[in-house]
Amino acid sequence: MGEITLTKIKKSFGAVDVLKDIDLEIKDGEFIVFVGPSGCGKSTLLRTIAGLEKVSSGEIEIDGKRVNEVSAADRGLAMVFQSYALYPHMSVRQNLAFGLENSNMPKTEVAERILEAARMLEIEPYLERRPGQLSGGQRQRVAIGRAIVRRPTAFLLDEPLSNLDAELRVSTRAELAALHGRLGSTMIYVTHDQVEAMTLAHRIVVMRAGKIEQVGTPLDLYNTPANRFVAGFIGAPHMNFLAGEVTELQNGAATLATSGGHRLLVPFSGHSLSVGDKLTIGIRPQHITLANDPGSLKVKVRLVEALGSETVIHADLNGEKLLAVVPGQKLISPGDEAHFSVAGAPLHLFDRNGLRVKGC
Amino acid sequence: MGVASRFILRRRGGKSWHWTDIVTWVWLVGGLIIMFGPAVWLAFSSFKTPAALAEFPPSILPYVTSQATVQGYDKPLQLFDAKMPDGSTKVLAEVRRIGLVAQMVDPKAPGEIVRVNINDRTPVRSVSFATENYTTPFTQFDFLQYLWNSVFVTVTATLITLIVNSMAAFALSKYEFRGRSLAMLVILATLMVPLSVIMVPLYSIISSLGLFNNLWGVILPTVATPTGVFILRQYMLTIPDELIDAARMDKASEWQIYWRIVLPLTAPALAVLAIFSVVWRWNDFLWPLIVLSRRELYTLQVGLSIYSGELNVQWHFILAMTVVTMIPVVLVFIFLQRFITTGIAGTGLK
Amino acid sequence: MTAPTPSPTLTERLGSLLMAPVHLLMRAIDIPLRAVQKAAGIGGMATVFLAPNMLIFGIFVLLPLVINFVYSMTGGTAFFLTERQFVGADQYARLFQCANYLDPMSCQEDAFWTAVGNTFWFVVLQVSLMILTALITALILNRDLAARSFWRAVFFFPVLLSPVVVGLIWKWILQRQGLLNFGLYQFGVEPYTWLTDRNWTFVATIGVSLWAHMGFYALILLAGLQAIPKDLYEAAEMDGTKPARVFWRITLPLLMPNLLVVVVLALIRAVQIFDEVYVLTGGGPGTSTLYLTQYIYETGFASALRNPGLAAAASILMGLVLVVLTLIQLGIGQRGEKKGKR
């Protein structure tokens, strides 16, 4: 079992509140990812779950039992650290055995578990080496191995891929996902990389400044971001934001005017908007097409990045920056005028406080 | 010889000798002579007999004059190379000297006395090492005991220093607790409290603890070195905290973290501190001089100084024992010099 | 990619064999400490780790520092505090009791003032010569020398020698039949007993302490010189700057933090000079090489008229000088640190 429940978790270092009223329920066997910019408190949250930091107030429960006062060693969790934190003076085998020996496990069982984990992670040939003699990827596997041999109720992973190069990161990501499928244990994974979050998570917890901004499946977050921050954080390149004003409300649609006087029609059914409201309009770069239709935006091209399969166009709309990612190769160059069409594209509306406007 | 010739011919980049090349050359060669010369001279002198030591001008190598037992004379006679009137040289034994004339005999024909001007004869000498300078102080004086005392003080004090300093450094580098900055401040502030400032009260504390005339009285005041805590703490700060966290997750107790994780990883700094501590404790003088007043407790340094201060200084023994006192430090110097020089350059501590 | 797996060598096996009892001992210590950790928590263990060092430190460094003031306010020859009577500032008054403040011989404690005067001149001369020679040595060692580490070792060698050994080496050399006289004899100078001449013993103490410690300071300065980025010199060379100008405008200013540290360290050490002088001259002849630490030592312990209170008072005065010097050093250190961070 690996259910973890956090209730009203607060943590402050001196006068600084690092975590503010965190509530979260993590189901058994779930792969959950904490994501957010650096300094948002996601690592601190992970460390309070681990027991390496004490909470200032609030409750942490593991499988229904309150563990606030239980030491890190006795919570039954295992952690994979960002720097791997392998003991440099011990061989890989000793690294894996250290924790088991500390809980006075019989030697034969220790050896068995090490062998099993080593086979699973394909690190058997390196068991007698020191971490210093291993490559980054191998060290990473050892770090995971050290967690696996403990057979923990949940795995805590603190940015485990951030020290790997780009290529290795992609392959290890896939292996991690496969490993989770095999072990079926709860995994809590911290990262600042939204791509990792999107690819790995059952559910993503987006954090900012010590607060949870939104919890949901990757596609929930992509399709209906709860606020401007989540909208900007999830998805690459970032969502475009334009200032707009409601000029008309009728027939299940709202008409919005952008700063340049362009008009955009957004399907809308609700009561939360009224004419004259100032809004932020969010458009994902991938949802923009090049076309000269009535609702299109006339822009000035600043920069063109031809990536072959797609073309990234940096453009200027009356002083506001607009980014479009269009498929294929386009004959367009900086200085040109272009028409960005958003017809049929999902537009996201955010009110003055950055919250998603209900009903759009 | 490549290095030597490169050194001799090295110039400041250009073709001709710059004045700084000459200064460098003079300074280095002069330095070599002045820095090594005295110690080498001492080492050579330590193998001379008292008679050779009293000679002036002195010889570099330890010579003894040759003697021979000649029939008809009770005592052995000194041998000389004497220049004969016919110009040849002959080995003769001197019977006695009257003014400028020496009465000499040929050892092979002891009957006939030959008179030779003392300027026409030179002593027959051979190189011989007076090893009894070394053996006598050990066998007949207390120097073996002093040596043992010094070794005991050095080894014990170094071990305790390493243990208590590393424990304190661990606490000061890896824990957050109230009073940590105060403890650091106290340690920093006393980094420079010299013995000379506290020797009177320290003496009273040592005697109230009953440690006067006790080697522990020499050891204990030296072991809580702020310098050691400082060096080790600086080093431990470079050990990632994640390692400690990982060990905690691995169910290690704090003591286990200290001796199974932190201590092995601090080995380089511990080695530097160990070397320093050995040199410090071996060389300590003033404090042992104050605490130890019984002869059998003297350390080598105290014993040497007391013996050399006596009225009839037996220099041949003193010199030999000085060499013995120098040996551990010279060994440390030869084998661990690199450690020490980088240690000093890095911390500015001695 | 696959490096051969290192099999344990003989030394490693021997090492683990020797370490076995240590490991056992550590395990034994762990048992009670686990209980302590349970009771005190992880944070409480910090105190446990700090305790032995702080206890020893408190008893043998902090406590004496405090008691020293009490000592300086009490009189008599007894060492136990309870047996000493309070005399207030008498000891200090005695130290400063002088008929003519320009003449140390007119003071009641003329030995103290002689020691102060000797120490002052010793410090001034020794430190300035020390800095000069150490700087020259460091500059020379910083040149592109063949076998630099050998030359560094040459100058560093005496630093490790014990003061007693240093004192004896030089006592032997300055003897009537010593190496110095032998050297001078080659130039026709008659042998001289250097260590019985008041002026020469003073010079000798300076020379000997220079010999013994110069390498240490040269090493610190050398480290400072080597920390100066090479490209600065290359840039100066590209600008056609004259070597002397390079020294005054680049080397010296950038070496200044190290130089200041060395000056203060040398001052602190020079004020406390004792061991090698004690062995070399015993403070004599007369009081010509009587320095402060020896005065304190003899007043407190060695002389027939011992007066621990007076020694404590003198040591506190000396401590004040050292505190000032240490504060200067800490100040320099912090300024250096701030600079480094920027």
Image (cartoon, coloured by chain):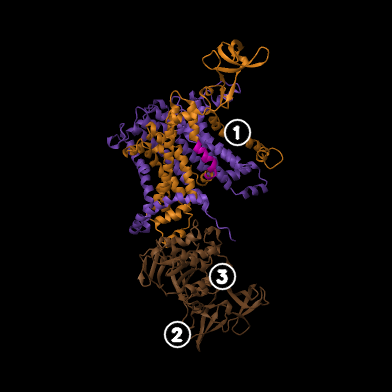
Chain colours: A brown, B orange, C purple
Alpha carbon separation for disc pair 2 and 3: 48 Å
> Which secondary structure, mark 3?
helix
Mark 1 crowdedness (10 Å alpha carbons): few <14, some 14-19, many ≥20? few
Residue A330 versus residue A66: which sits nearer the camera? A66
- Amino acid type, mark 2: His
Badge 3 crowding class, 10 Å Cα cut-off, few under 14, some 14 to 19, many 20 or more, is few
Res A271 label: 2
Circle 1: residue type: Gly
Q: Determine the secondary structure under disc 1.
A: helix
User: Is residue C261 shown above or below B76?
Assistant: below
> What residue type is disc 3 on?
Ser
| Residue B29: x %, y % from top left | 61, 34
Could you tell me if the residues under marks 1 and 3 are in contact, i.e. CB atoms within 8 Å? no
Q: Chain of mark 1?
A: B
The range drawn in magenta is B327-339
Residues marked 2 and 1, same chain? no
Q: Which residue is under mark 3?
A: A171
- Is C79 left or right of B166, judged from the image as shown? left
In the rendering, at what x and y percent does residue C302 appear? 37, 30
Secondary element at tag 2: loop
Above or below for A188 versus A220 = above
Res. A290 visible in picture: yes
* Sequence order check, earlier mark of 2 and 3: 3
Can residue B338 be found in the magenta stretch?
yes
Q: Taken as a whole, is the magenta stretch helix, strand or loop?
A: helix
| Mark 2 or mark 1, whichever is nearer to me | 1
Q: Nearer the viewer, residue B146 or A248?
A: B146
What chain is tagged by disc 2?
Answer: A
Residue A317 visible somewhere in the drawing: no
Camera-side mark, 2 or 3: 3
Residue located beneath label 1 in the image: B30
